[in-house]
Amino acid sequence: MRVRWLAAMPALIAGAGVLLWAQASGSDFPDARATDPVTLGWMTGSPPPAGKIVRFSDGSHYKFPQTRWAFSHMRELVPTAVVPRGAGPVSALPRSERRDLDAVTFMPIGKSTPMTWAAAFDANYTDGIVVLHRGQIVYERYGGALTPERQHIAFSVTKSFVATLASILMAEGRLDERATVASYVPELQRSAFGDATIRQLLDMTTGLDYSEDYADDRSPVWSLGRAVGFLPMPPGYSRPATSYAYLASLAKSGAHGERFVYKTPNTDVLAWVLRRVSGQTLSDLLCERIFSKLGAEQDAYFLVDATGVEFAGGGLHMALRDLARFGEAMRLDGKFNGQQIVPKTFVDDVRRGGDTQKFAGAGYTTLPGGSYHSMWWVLHNPHGAYSARGIHGQAIYVDPAAEMVIARFASHPLGGNVNIDPMSLPAYDAVAKHLMKP
Amino acid sequence: MRVRWLAAMPALIAGAGVLLWAQASGSDFPDARATDPVTLGWMTGSPPPAGKIVRFSDGSHYKFPQTRWAFSHMRELVPTAVVPRGAGPVSALPRSERRDLDAVTFMPIGKSTPMTWAAAFDANYTDGIVVLHRGQIVYERYGGALTPERQHIAFSVTKSFVATLASILMAEGRLDERATVASYVPELQRSAFGDATIRQLLDMTTGLDYSEDYADDRSPVWSLGRAVGFLPMPPGYSRPATSYAYLASLAKSGAHGERFVYKTPNTDVLAWVLRRVSGQTLSDLLCERIFSKLGAEQDAYFLVDATGVEFAGGGLHMALRDLARFGEAMRLDGKFNGQQIVPKTFVDDVRRGGDTQKFAGAGYTTLPGGSYHSMWWVLHNPHGAYSARGIHGQAIYVDPAAEMVIARFASHPLGGNVNIDPMSLPAYDAVAKHLMKP
């Protein structure tokens, strides 16, 4: 289990270090009720008692169960850049609640006892979940420290937004997926990325000397979290202190285009290209091209590094309903709130998915037959589902056949989705089938 | 001039240190056009060139002209707590533009050559100004790095919000202005504030050993900015590292109630009391009691210290139109957006003002005959104007006779409003008289 979990785990989890490494499954952790951040009183009181303070400087923001508070309060701990919702009206998300969903049962992967949709909420340490059916909210529930107004970290769901932005610039002819990274960002010429193409970034097939060796204190995975501003730097820290310095320091290993290996820096390099092409910050680009068009309810925001550069690989935070709105746009061929926000050709391309052979070797046991394409996860299941996924249980799940979109934020104690998929993917499928009943 | 400027300057300015101390007037600084943050390209580029990076860690966020960028981008530099706008609709601010305002002339204090309203915009390093007349936007203009969607630091205008919150809890009988600080916050029993009353905080008549001696590197004024999170702490910093620790460290000097001396820590102590009384964070309290009721366009936010405590003395940031909405509520007897948001008795009390005798000794040469009451500045002028004021030119100006409210954000190179009042207060009065013409 341990090996597969690590294989499935994106780089960022490195930050949790010893704690998460020492645990091979979620069963050793206290459950959602015992770690409820409101009951535990994190950051409650004036001042909060010493033992109830969550900080960035000591890394407690990324220790469980403090994460159950921190994932909904990141801006109180670190500098952030706003992605304004824009000045327009909030787009309608009509509501037609379906209480019957709570009783829907499913069989968790690897188990022989069914579980209800209602029970999965706590089992997955869910901070909030919204189910849209034909554009209507049929289910909405919050837990942990999240409220409808508050933004939660989306972790690698961020990547799907960034790649979707890239698709918009490609459709306009401003970005060529066949061009090399260095043709846009000459500073990366001598790094691993210099001769990689934009398409190789998008599909994470770059050959990158980037390991996830947690026993090595100088491993790149530790350095990434620090450089992008997600983890504190110890005193006297001498590794790259900014996102760009870190990316430029990465060396090549093997050939580009041969294998899919999920490596977060690809997205941060893509974002660097997008900034260079657009002349905008990633925040402004996301606002202008996607976010403001969704009719979002709340501003979103990015975690930024020591020079104000957004963490494109995992630093977007937003309100849950706005995450659902984006999912709905991706269900509706890119069209939402009366506008074609995302090119239909891109949505079609995501649905077709990527190379399942290349994906098969990557060890994602909960996604058999799946693929990764343009920073979206494609299930290649009978419903044609595709998903944006982030560690600790962040997800957009689009089921075209069921006309269903699920948006979920969570604070599962373990990073890798392999730990939360068993009680999530079959649950999504069961609810989809339930909603498809006449 | 130097002495008077210092007398008028709130504590926070200490953070600017040598730069602002060395200058007795704004005339030695490059003008608004020469310091335009967009033209200068602060934080522009991917990455911004080394010389164009504005940071908190090196204090460049509080050096002029970087302040012209930073005052509209603080959340990108430091941790912040959101004050949600709430889920309700945006309240209407009808628009009826009056281009004729630009040609209105006034005589700056101490000058013999008139200036136009239009020229005052740059002369005051204005980042944004809105004039409401009878509830309609008759003038709105942005400069610097501000946009209608972006939040600007309000500095000590924050204090007027905090005192207004206190008035709401007082009207409900939950807070007694005659009670001592220690009766609410026993931790402050042995500090200067222990036997001070809430009223003495509100009117800043506490006897506080709190100097503004810039030559002393251990002066309390430097320590305040660091403790509340507005200024970086040097390596090995040994003074109080949080707002609460700092407030508890302040000793008494003289008797309470005798003199008005503007001292920022009074507001942070008041906020501590409000948190204790309400059981809420200041952000949540402000959202619930005022901000969400205004029908604000954007979220607001607070600068927070190393334990997440909001800087009540000067850390609120908001969009300009939302600042104007609050001013309009204070003009309309506390009623706005269909609700009685602020108790009418409080607005009446603010209008009556405070002790002009106590105020007269404090050296505010641009506010002759004025007073300070409940953290509002009262002009006692023929129009009955009252104002919320923050360093570097932040202001709400309510002119009841003219049915006018002005909200302004600025990034004047000097902190003390004595430097910006000469081209502001007569301008406000001239526009008021212009708008009163039939």
Image (cartoon, coloured by chain):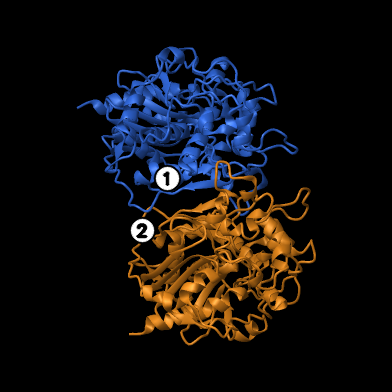
Chain colours: A orange, B blue
Q: Nearer the viewer, residue A171 or B319?
A: B319
Residue A228, image x, y percentages: 65, 57
- Residue, disc 2: A90
Image-quadrant location for residue B322: top left
Q: Is residue B31 visible?
A: no
Say if B250 sits above or below B96 in the image.
Answer: above
Mark 1 to mark 2 CA distance (whole Å): 19 Å
The amino acid sitting under disc 1 is: Cys
**What amino acid is at disc 2?**
Val
Near-viewer residue (B51 or B321):
B321
Q: Residue at x 32, y 70 (%)?
A: A96
Q: Residue B71's spot in the image, x, y percent?
A: 53, 39
Q: How many numbered markers are drawn?
A: 2
Q: Please, what secondary structure does the residue beneath circle 2 have? A: loop
Q: Are marks 1 and 2 on the same chain?
A: no
Label number found at residue B287: 1
Chain holding disc 1:
B
Q: Residues within 10 Å of mark 2 (few under 14, many from 20)?
A: some
Q: Is residue B349 visible?
A: yes
The subunit letter for the residue under badge 2 reads A
Of the pair B22 and B80, the residue shown nearer to us: B80
* Residue at figure coordinates x 69%, y 56% from the top left: A226
Specify the quadrant that holds the C terminus of chain B: top left
Q: Is residue B235 left or right of residue B228?
A: right
Is residue A218 depicted above or below B35 in this figure?
below
- Please name the residue shown 64% across and 72% down the image: A27
CB contact under 8 Å: marks 1 and 2: no
- Closer to the observer: label 1 or label 2? 1
* Helix, strand or loop at mark 1: helix
Question: Is the N terminus of chain B in the top left, top right, bottom left or bottom right quadrant?
Answer: top right
Image coords of residue B184 (percent x, y): 51, 33
Nearer-the-camera pick, A409 or B141: A409
